[in-house]
Image (cartoon, rainbow, N blue to C red):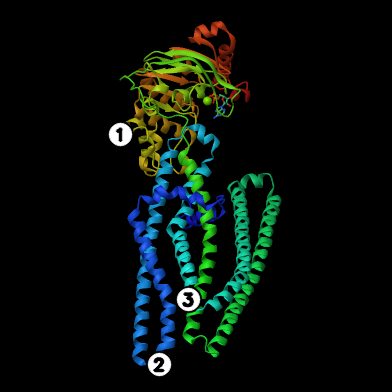
Amino acid sequence: MREDSQEFADRVSREAAARPPGRNVGGLRRLAPYVARYRLLVAATLIALLTASGATLLIPVAVREVIDLGFGANSAELVHRYFAAMMAVAVVLGLATAARFYFISWLGERVVADLRRDVYGHVLNMSPEFFETTRTGEVLSRLTADTTLIQTVVGSSASIALRNIFLLLGGLVMLVVTSAKLTGLVLVFVPVVIIPIIMLGRRVRGLSRASQDRIADASAQAGEVLDDITVVQAFTQEDTERGRFNATVEHGFEVAMLRIRARAILTALVIVLVFGAITGVLWFGAQGVLDGSMSAGALGQFVLYAVFVAGAVGALSEVWGDMQRAAGATERLMELLSAKPAIAPPVNPIDLPASTQCQVIFDAVKFHYPSRPLDYALNNISFTLAPGETVALVGPSGAGKSTLLQLLLRFYDPAAGSITLDGVDITKADPRAVRRRIAIVPQNTIIFSTTARENIRYGRPDASDEEVRAAASAAQATEFLQKLPEGLDTFLGEKGVRLSGGQRQRIAIARAILRNAPLLLLDEATSALDAENERLVQVALDALVASRTTLVIAHRLATVRRADRIIVLDEGRIVATGRHDELMARGGLYARLAELQFTDSAEMAAGGQLKLLKF
Ligand SMILES: Nc1ncnc2c1ncn2[C@@H]1O[C@H](COP(=O)(O)OP(=O)(O)O)[C@@H](O)[C@H]1O
Ligand SMILES: [Mg+2]
């Protein structure tokens, strides 16, 4: 089931709150190139910001004038004028604040859109090695949660921080100007009020995150169980699952209670401390007004500035956490952006010569997967595929057959030796040019969550509807596709869950047929088909194979016998090559595999063990 946009937004913001913060906010500097692209927007934001802060700082002055001069002189004329001035300030403040919001949000959205585009574009170029060490989930978190954090900072926190720094400094200056004596008093009060509030506030936030995490744990647990409820019931584990869920829920309740207690204390503390401080300062100020050392208006002005300053400090402490987390997000995104793909086109890639039937040469190729440096998946592999030739690759599961195709597609480079395609060492060509020559039906069929038509068209996006239909029919897919509710336009569900294995495989074959590339790689392409459909698909594949070079990893003897040549692979080495009869006469691994296959198709006699030994 797809989540709706509200669920997605909730999940992303929960995830964003849980992302680790950066070591210091300096990491945010690396966003500078992204922000600098929009100098005009930045300038507009700054102007709006300064105007709004300036207007805010003017309000208390207007208030004092009204109190002292207007009321004092008892002049109705002056009162009119000051109230008009205050109204004007309010209008400026309103417009400037709206403008700041508009420009800064625009900047935030723009920067994040650029970042998302760059990161995704970059990740699409990474080689499989990268995805073996980085979980896809982590990449997605960086694309969504981390960019959201940056958006918060660029599109709001940064401007809140700037505005409050400005208000703080301006407010402090104005406090001193208004009354140096009272300012001294406030400076004593501020830490006493602010520090406990900030500390307790942090604890409340930490606890509410923890309780959200507990809820997420519980729902993840429940989701897993409900997805596979039949297994739970079949193994009569309902009580265990109930207990496990209860424990998580109770733990969540305890964390929530901790949060609620802290929050209650915080509320009391905030009210008592803040009102206490204001009352205290007012009381001192009132003494001044009484003994004539200060005007009533000045006291009002002072209190307003004190409120601004306290508010600014509070707001700064609020956005500080955002800035830290955004700094962490920036570090992670920049790390992704600077990751170099292991496979990249050379500076001056050599063009592959035009050809309709590829020639492939493996010369003493040695290869191990990056995660297994000591274990050669391919060892000293040499062979040639002549143009138009069909070669079958056989060997027990794990022999290295699929690995060989991965190297040919240049998902990895050999540790030693070379692979040549149409006379060009593939490491000297653009990997995309190499892959454009190849159509593959992979061992695991990949179906995208779109229509059958678009899935087939993935082989060649510019193919016409007629060509798509022809490919589907050649892959024997027309019959089952016609039975789907909307034929070729039926949505196949995520990962093609609405199709059987054999149906998925026929779509993959249609895709390869449509691609019409000079080199065809089949990795157990018909393994999920029943005998009847396989015979039909085989006819289509035969036509395809006849006109191009083909390397087929075969699991059925019928396919193997049709090949011009057979290469037998075992534990990463070529142990024999030849035609079926020669290899049978020689005995050894091939004969053993072939014999099992015969038994398999003839009587199904030997049972489960056969499935382990796949051709
Ligand atoms: N991505 C990978 N990382 C590490 N080892 C791998 C990876 N893929 C395959 N292998 C290992 O390489 C060997 C050859 O695998 P593979 O080429 O898939 O075999 P086959 O296709 O012949 O069944 C196996 O031992 C397998 O476990
Ligand atoms: Mg394989």
- Kind of residue sitting beneath label 1: Ala
Looking at the picture, does residue 188 appear above or below residue 412? below
* Residue furthest bottom as drawn: 74
Note whether ligand 1 is within 8 Å of mark 2: no
Given residues 148 and 167, the one toward you in this image is: 167
On-image quarter of the C terminus: top right
Q: CA distance from mark 3 to mark 1?
A: 76 Å
Which residue is rendered at x = 47% and y = 74% of the image? 174
- Kind of residue sitting beneath label 3: Val
Given residues 164 and 237, the one toward you in this image is: 164
- Kind of residue sitting beneath label 2: Ala
Q: Which residue is mark 2?
A: 73
Task: Identify the image quadrant of residue 207.
Answer: bottom right
Task: Tell me residue 275's x, y (percent).
Answer: 59, 79
In this rendering, does residue 498 appear at all?
Answer: no
For marks 1 and 2, give the one nearer the viewer. 2
